[in-house]
Image (cartoon, helix red, strand yellow):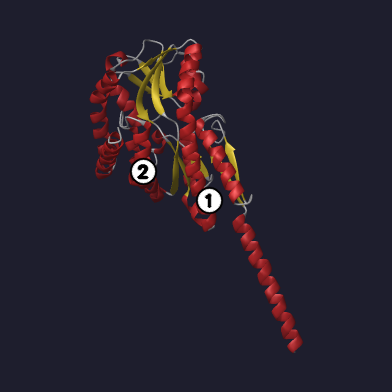
Amino acid sequence: MKKSLWFSSVAMVVACIFLFSGMVFGASSVKVRVSLCNSPTHPQSIGMQVFKKYVEENTKGNVKVALYYNSQLGGERESVEQVKSGSLEMATASAGPLTTFNNKFMVLDIPFAFDSYEIAWGVLDGPMGQKLLNSSENIGLKGLAYLENGYRHVTNNVRPINGPDDLKGIKIRTMEAPMHMENFKVLGANPTPVPWTELYLTMQQRIVDGQENPLANIWEVKMYEVQKYTSLTGHIYDPMPLVANLAWFNKLPKDYQSIIKEGAVLAQNYSRFVNKAREDAIVEKLTAKGMEVNAVTAAGKEKMRAKSQAPVVAKIKAGTDKAFVDEWLAAIELMKKDVDAGF
């Protein structure tokens, strides 16, 4: 009887060990698919390659990260929708498409909000930037970091842009982002939303006169083949938030969650470094390809800011949490003061 009881106890222990081992294995074997809209050489993609390396090494290969470039899994809006629904683990997207899901992201579409990268990064890495990321948890998204895309600039085939008067009557492609369209409308241009995947063909067929994008994108999609002028307007600073499905993320072991969050910040910072370091070289390359590149003066930018910022902010306040917008603007002013105090 005692012998039988002993064997039963051993069998139970062995069964528990196998069960526990299975649970650990199930929890530790994770596949992460990330949708990216740009090529493997774009700054945000390079940042995500750092993310992949960091996460896989620090989980001893138990978390496998697969990066899907060039909108293989769908455009930005589609990819975020897949993450939200749980059919995809992660995606990066510009603020414009994200506003479809969380209108608080419209604060990133305020024109001429940030006078420098340092001010922009300070706000995004501070309490308000974190508050913006956290605000997506109400819709099932976990905001992890802000991958770099850079300042958006204007290219066109009509004339160089040096101020608001130069934009009058120009038909310009924008993202499918209401506040981007509003900005150019107020500045006198005719904004036309076109998906990123259709951009080159749209410019090649001259459906519009121009478009707006960060320098990295202007170079990568070969705008020099279909556009004559690049004007460094810097009208909107355009980070690309990295989001994950919240329910999926919360089910991960805590140590994996920490590693993924750390990897996201590493990716963010590395993509910023790469983007900023490349911009002067891209201007030289665009010039070598025959484009006429002009830097808009501070006075020219101020004229555009004076004309467009207040109307766009008013529209944003009408479409989202007014108090949040005021907090965001206050954070920008405080960061600007802190940065300026160092000079």
Q: In which quarter of the image is the C terminus?
A: top left
* Disc 2 from disc 1: Cα separation: 20 Å
Percent position (x, y) of residue 287?
47, 13
Percent from the top left, x then y, of residue 292? Answer: 42, 11
Q: In this view, does 193 lie to the left or right of 169?
A: right
**Relative vertical location of residue 253 with respect to residue 232 in this rendering, above or below:** below
Which residue matches tag 1? 259
Residue drawn at (63%, 51%) of the image: 60
Judged from the image, the secondary structure of the residue bearing numbered disc 1 is helix
Choose top left, top right, bottom left or bottom right for residue 338: top left
Using the image as rendered, state which of residue 252 and residue 197 is in the foreground.
252
Q: Where is residue 29 in the image (x, y as percent from the top left)?
A: 62, 53
Q: Is residue 111 left or right of residue 284?
A: left
Rendered view: 179 above or below 125: above
Give the quadrant of residue 69.
Answer: top right
Vertical arrangement, residue 232 with respect to residue 107, above or below: above
Q: What residue type is labelled 2?
A: Gly
Crowding at dot 2, Cα within 10 Å, few <14 / some 14-19 / many 20+, comes out as some
Residue 232 placement (x, y as % from top left):
38, 20
| Whether residue 36 is visible | no
Q: Residues within 10 Å of mark 1 (few under 14, many from 20)?
A: some
Residue bearing mark 2: 129
Dot placed on the residue nearer the N-terminal end, 2 or 1: 2
Count of numbered circles in the view: 2
Compared across the picture, whether 216 is left or right of 109 comes to: right
The single residue placed furthest to the bottom in the displayed view is 1
Would residue 277 be visible to someone looking at this image? yes
Q: Is mark 2 on a helix, strand or loop?
A: helix
Residue beneath the point at 27% across and 36% down: 341
> What kind of residue is marked 1?
Ile
